[in-house]
Image (cartoon, helix red, strand yellow):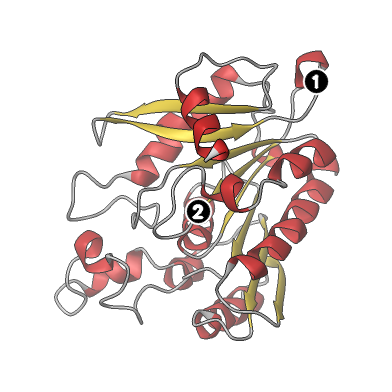
Amino acid sequence: MISRLLFLFLAFTSIQLSAKIDTLFVYSEEMNKEIPSLVILPEGIENQSDNLPIIYLLHGAGGNFDNWYRRFPEIQNLSNEYNCIVVCPDGGKTSWYIDSPIDPQMKYESYVINHLIPKVDSIYPTIKSSSSRAITGLSMGGHGALFLAIRHPDLFGYAGSMSGGVDLRPFKTNWGLPDILGNATENPLHWEEHSVVAIVKEIQTDQKFIIDCGLDDFFLDVNRDLHRIMTDQGISLQYSERQGTHNWEYWRVSVLEHFLFFSSHFKK
């Protein structure tokens, strides 16, 4: 209850760089609505003269913009430790962070790329370069992070996925996917064009990726497929599997590895 009241309070206060957590509302022209993001700032940011790297952290299906902080408030400690800004956008319940080819009210790729990133860069002291901008997420957010990074290498130098649903095609009736991609039998191209496993075959990139999945996760097979494809193409990838399933006990460990990975590259 206290955590929820905190978020409500922040939502109705103006942005202050001295705060550790902001709720930032950014308007989506395509969807005609204000969309919230949680912005986590490192301690002492108001006293720093240098601009900072930034990590976009995406939630999974059924979650929202405060999901990561509510389930893992230690995100603030990671922001402090690595001296980076963390942005947790709201991706809707089942948007998969794409622009739907059939639903004009579901345009989350356009929102993140055209509206959220420019607004964040205009307000906060970010390093406005792909070499200091990363994106990762869990489950649906893992798919979204890789999808956005692969399609926009000019914006993201690094990307990750934790237990990501990186191939949508095997899940033809799950998680609202038919509502945003259409019937899989009638619209196979929609499903292929929006699956990371398919689009990664078409790229050549110097981006760096970190991907992991639990050994008891229902997305394990599609992550292994992605690992094989990216390895065959010579894409820079840190891939791992470990004991665990599709839950917060697993992701609380994964996120530590992802922040360490991104930070090590930011320093380079």
Q: Is 20 displayed left or right of 216 in the figure? A: right
Query: Which residue is pictured at 81% across the width and 40% down the height?
Result: 82
Q: Which residue is tagged 2?
A: 59
| Kind of residue indicated by mark 1 | Asp
Query: Which residue is pictured at 47% across the width and 73% down the height?
Result: 197
| Kind of residue indicated by mark 2 | His
Residue 131 in which image quadrant: top right
Residue 237 in which image quadrant: bottom right
Q: Position of residue 46 (x, y in %)?
A: 76, 15
Q: What is the distance, in whole Å, between disc 2 and disc 1 at their CAs?
A: 29 Å
Could you classify mark 1 by the number of other residues whose Cα lies within 10 Å: few (under 14), some (14-19), or many (20 or more)? few
Q: Nearer the viewer, residue 21 or 215?
A: 21
Q: Quadrant of the C terminus?
A: top right
The mark that comes first in sequence, 2 or 1, is 1
Task: Tell me if residue 201 comes above or below residue 15 in the rendering.
Answer: below
Task: Tell me if residue 240 comes above or below residue 209 in the rendering.
Answer: below
Which residue appears farthest toward the front when viewing the image?
1
Q: Which residue is tagged 1?
A: 50
Task: Tell me if residue 266 comes above or below residue 175 in the rendering.
Answer: above
Query: Which residue is pictured at 21% across the width and 44% down the height?
Result: 105
Mark in the foreground, 2 or 1: 2
Query: Which residue is pictured at 61% across the width and 73% down the height?
Result: 230
Task: Tell me if residue 252 comes above or below residue 218 in the rendering.
Answer: above
